[in-house]
Amino acid sequence: MHHYYHPQKSGGVAALLEVLPGLFLQTFGIGHIYAGNVGTGLIIMFGYWALTAVNVLLCFVFIGFITWPLCWIAAMILSSLTAANACKSR
């Protein structure tokens, strides 16, 4: 049996990988993929895009102009915190 050394992932790097692409490209989940949680990262990524599509439709009745920024801020904060914590638990 082979035992490979896996260096500890940095929680700060995971948080930055959530915040920077989320800030410029609205792509959340990359920090989770870095932390080793590929499934969670993809769920966050595609889930946020689906939520964005709903908010775009809600912009036609003007409530989307309120809900879209709130969802973006919530995704920015929650995904970066959970990605940083995912690195600590591995």
Image: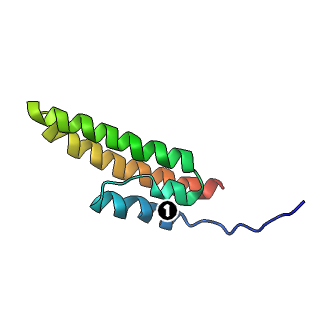
On the question of residue 79 being in view, the answer is yes
At horizontal 41% and vertical 58% (from top left) the residue drawn is: 18
On the question of residue 62 being in view, the answer is no
30 sits to left or right of 73: right
At horizontal 31% and vertical 54% (from top left) the residue drawn is: 26
Instruction: Measuring from the top left, give residue 56's x and y in whole percent.
Output: 19, 39
Residue type beneath disc 1: Ala
Picture quadrant of residue 24:
bottom left
Rendered-image quadrant of the C terminus = bottom right
- Image position of 63 with respect to 85: above or below: above
**Count of residue discs:** 1
Q: Secondary structure at mark 1?
A: helix
27 sits to left or right of 9: left
- Image position of 63 with respect to 34: above or below: above
At horizontal 33% and vertical 45% (from top left) the residue drawn is: 74
Instruction: Measuring from the top left, give residue 3's x and y in whole percent.
Output: 83, 64
At horizontal 43% and vertical 44% (from top left) the residue drawn is: 44
Instruction: Measuring from the top left, give residue 11's x and y in whole percent.
Output: 53, 63
- Image position of 87 with respect to 71: above or below: below
15 sits to left or right of 73: right
Q: As drawn, which residue projects farthest toward the top? A: 61
Q: How is the image coloured?
A: rainbow
Q: Nearer the viewer, residue 89 or 3?
A: 3
Q: Which residue is mark 1?
A: 14
Rendered-image quadrant of the N terminus = bottom right
Picture quadrant of residue 46:
top left
Q: Nearer the viewer, residue 35 or 82?
A: 35
Instruction: Measuring from the top left, give residue 43's x and y in whole percent.
Output: 47, 42
Q: Residues within 10 Å of mark 1 (few under 14, many from 20)?
A: many
- Image position of 51 with respect to 8: above or below: above
